[in-house]
C-alpha cells in the first residue's frame, strides 16, 4: 500500500498539514490568553488551526479520489466508517452523562482528534477482518 503513488502524496500532504496544525495551535495558545473576549483578532487566530483541519479532511477525500484500486479505497472507507461510528457513540454517551450527571464537560475541540484515533481503530479492524495483505485471516 505505501508504495502506491496516492499514498505517497497523502503522506506528504498529511505531514505538512499536521505540522501546520500543531504550529497554529501553539501560536493560538501563546497569543490568546485564557478567558479572552471574542475580539475579531482572537477569533481569527483561534480559527487558523481549523484551516489545517479542513485541509486534513480535504486530503482524506482526495486520497479516495486518487486511489485507483477499489480494494484500497474500500479499506480507507471502512476506516472512516469505524472512526465516525466510534466518535458518534462516544459523543452521544458522554453527552448523556453530561446531561444527567456531574461528569466534567468535554470541549467540542476534541471531536476531530478522537475521530483521528478512531481511524487507528478502523485500521486495526481492517487488519483483523481483512488480513494484512487483504486476504481473509
Image: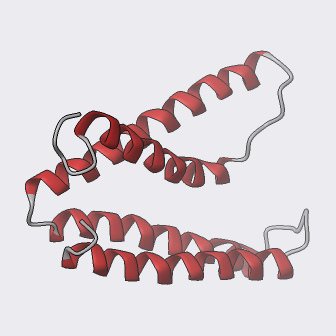
- Above or below, comparing residue 95 to residue 70 in the picture: above
Residue sitting nearer the eye, 136 or 72: 136
| Corner quadrant of residue 45 | bottom right
Quadrant for the C terminus, please. Answer: top left
Q: Is residue 29 left or right of residue 10?
A: right
**Which residue shows up at 35% across the image and 47% down it?**
80
Between 134 and 57, the one lying in front of the other is 134
Residue 6: image x %, image y %?
Answer: 22, 75
Residue positioned 37% across, 37% down in the render: 125
The residue that appears at 76% across and 15% down in the rendered structure is 100
Residue 11 against residue 110 in the figure, above or below: below
For this view, does 65 lie left or right of residue 91? left
Give whichever of 57, 79 is nearer the camera.
Answer: 79
What residue is drawn where x is 60% and y is 75%?
21
> Based on the displayed image, in which of its 4 quarters is residue 64 positioned?
bottom left
Tell me if residue 13 comes above or below residue 118 in the rendering: below
- Eyeballing the image, is 101 above or below 54? above
Left or right, 7 with respect to 120, comes to: left
**Could you tell me residue 24's position as x and y percent?**
67, 80
Drawn side of residue 121 relative to residue 74, left or right: right
**Residue 89 locus on image (x, y percent):** 52, 28
Give the colouring mode of the picture: secondary structure
Residue most extreme to the top = 100
Quadrant of the snapshot with the N terminus: bottom left
Label tally: 0
Amino acid at each position: 500500500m505505501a508504495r502506491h503513488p496516492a499514498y505517497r502524496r497523502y503522506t506528504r500532504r498529511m505531514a505538512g498539514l499536521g505540522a501546520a496544525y500543531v504550529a497554529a495551535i501553539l501560536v493560538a495558545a501563546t497569543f490568546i490568553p485564557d478567558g479572552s473576549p471574542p475580539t475579531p483578532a482572537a477569533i481569527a487566530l483561534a480559527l487558523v488551526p481549523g484551516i489545517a483541519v479542513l485541509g486534513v479532511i480535504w486530503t482524506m477525500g482526495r486520497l479516495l479520489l486518487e486511489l485507483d484500486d477499489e480494494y484500497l479505497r474500500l479499506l480507507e472507507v471502512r476506516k472512516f466508517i469505524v472512526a465516525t461510528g466510534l466518535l458518534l457513540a462516544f459523543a452521544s454517551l458522554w453527552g448523556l452523562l453530561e446531561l444527567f450527571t456531574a461528569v466534567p464537560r468535554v470541549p467540542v475541540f476534541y471531536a476531530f482528534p478522537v475521530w483521528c484515533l478512531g481511524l487507528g481503530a478502523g485500521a486495526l479492524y481492517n487488519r483483523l477482518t481483512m488480513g494484512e495483505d487483504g486476504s481473509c485471516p
